[in-house]
Amino acid sequence: MSSFDDENIFGKGEFNEMFDEYFTGKSFLNPLVDMEDNLLFVANVTFEPGCRNNWHIHHAKKGGGQLLICVAGKGFYQEEGSEVQELKPGVVVEIPPNVKHWHGAQKDSWFSHISVEVPGEETSNEWLEPVSDEYYNQL
């Protein structure tokens, strides 16, 4: 863990209690900007080994979506109907609005990414079913 902490230059942050119900395992959130005084929500999200979020969709009538900038450890990203993508530091993932997807840590690694919520019109997040242990453990 200490080498991961050294690599994770934006900091682990605090236990992500507000969104815990949408994660399998523990995640941590370190906001990088004041959420009320900035145009974008930008935060470093850290996942313990095996932690992943539920399938979800960032809805938007116009604009919207999410940008992930991987900064430490190893993770996964998957859009519905597509193959799983391995994530590592330096990888950038552009998630279009209205696309069902999930992301999180690999089983044997902590993982952190910076999350940028892309502004848009009539945006909302829809949280869906968890990524099953049966499916995840085959990755």
Image (cartoon, rainbow, N blue to C red):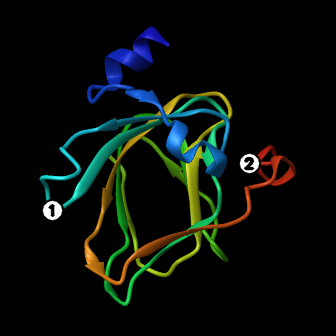
Residue beneath disc 2: 139
Residue 96, above or below 44: below
**Mark 2 / mark 1, whichever is N-terminal:** 1
The residue at 25%/72% (across/down) is 119
Residue beneath disc 1: 39
- Local crowd size for mark 1, using a 10 Å CA cut-off: few (<14), some (14–19), many (≥20): few
Asked if disc 2 and disc 1 are in contact, CB closer than 8 Å, the reply is no
The answer to whether residue 78 is seen in the rendering is: no
Task: List the single residue furthest toward the top.
Answer: 2
Q: Is residue 92 left or right of residue 37?
A: right
Secondary structure at badge 2 equals: loop
Q: Amino acid at mark 1?
A: Leu
Q: Quadrant of residue 31?
A: top left
Q: Position of residue 91 (x, y in %)?
A: 36, 50
Residue 121, above or below 85: below
Q: Is residue 101 left or right of residue 34?
A: right
Residue 117: mark in rendering? none
Q: Position of residue 122 (x, y in %)?
A: 35, 84
